[in-house]
Image: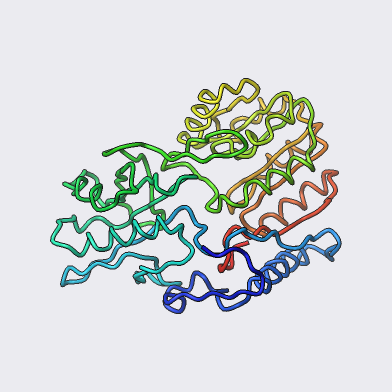
Amino acid sequence: MKNAATDETVDCPHRVECGACSLLRQSYEQQLQQKRRWLMEAIAKKGRPDKKKILPTLASPQIEGYRNRAKMAISTDRERRSALGYFQRSSREVVDAPQCGVLVPELLETSRSLRKLLNSPTQFPYILRHIDIRCGSDPTQQHLTLVIKAETLPKLPIEAIAEACPHVAGIGVNLNPGRGPQVIKGPIAAVHGVREVYVESAGMSLRVSPGSFFQVNLGLLPEIHSRMAEFLDGGKLLVDLYAGVGTHGLALRRNFRRVLCVEGVRSSVADAKASIKSAHVDNVEILGSPIHRAQRRLRSERPDAVILNPSAAGADPQTLEMIVSSPAQRAAYLSCDPSTLVRDLEILIKGGFQLVTIQAIDMMPQTRQV
């Protein structure tokens, strides 16, 4: 693994075909500057940005071997040779990627073992279309989801997979016969070993199930939480919206008398509740409900501070208006997309909030993701 030496460049044999890591040949310092410029350009579309408020990009501790999850597609030709990798940009062609440098090395090792197994006499059903491998803080404890394009469960070589992939502690199966772009849709049935992985964060062991979202770059979480804690300070109540498995709200639990985490994905809600129970945390409540259905409850609360961590689609206007009308004095917004972030900030600022600082965070070095 390589640390974030800012004058260093890396390369990948899959760079041209795959295209996902499009910044590979830039030095890391150039990548960080470029992502700050992209953020400034997004802000400039809504007005003249105050450059003093746009901080330098927060660097990743590692620029390779950082990604703790891989969703890979499988394609098989007429000679039954299988490729395991990623879709080519603007295409459904699968780029075989046995040397993907952004993956945690142990995940890459598992993907190579699976590729070898796919091209062995071991019988895999043709309708196996994707795999989803992830790990938590321990890269040798992995969970593998097999995505099957069928409505019924076929015979699978589970024992052969477990033997070939010693880091895989659990295997699940997702039946997804649809044609859409969503890789995993619907429930994931456990067929072998453990059902989840664990992430050590802020003195807690967070349970993360296959269907739950979690940040792909664990190395940045301590710095993100430190900055959130410094800015939000403390108080009686913190509300964590789009909370996932409770990552951010739980990290700041000691700063507030009470924390309310709101999440609509069932697997994430179950994970958060399990983590709280295991750690005997008594000041955090998990409200399992989509935010638009929890508006009455949320309007009855009087938060001192709010965290938002929505998907790339951003927050819905009703939620933003609820924050504006609440007594919350501070908000920390962790965004997946600069354009929707700027759109949502406009609503918050019109409602009376002031922008203090804004900063790109390099969760995904080598890529265009901000």
Q: Is residue 294 shown above or below 72? A: above
Q: Residue 9, position in %: x, y? A: 58, 75
Q: Residue 114, position in %: x, y? A: 28, 58
Q: Residue 80, position in %: x, y? A: 17, 68
Foreground of the two, 366 or 212: 366
Give the total of numbered labels: 0
Relative to residue 90, is residue 128 drawn left or right? left
Q: Residue 209, position in %: x, y? A: 43, 39
Q: Which residue is rendered at x = 52% and y = 23% of the image? A: 277
Identify the image quadrant of residue 363. bottom right
Q: Is residue 44 shown above or below 114? A: below
Q: Is residue 193 shown above or below 298? A: below
Foreground of the two, 41 or 165: 165
Relative to residue 226, is residue 89 drawn left or right? left
Q: Which residue is rendered at x = 39% and y = 69% of the image? A: 99
Q: Which residue is rendered at x = 62% and y = 47% of the image? A: 221
Q: Which residue is rendered at x = 74% and y = 40% of the image? A: 229
Scheme of colours in the image: rainbow
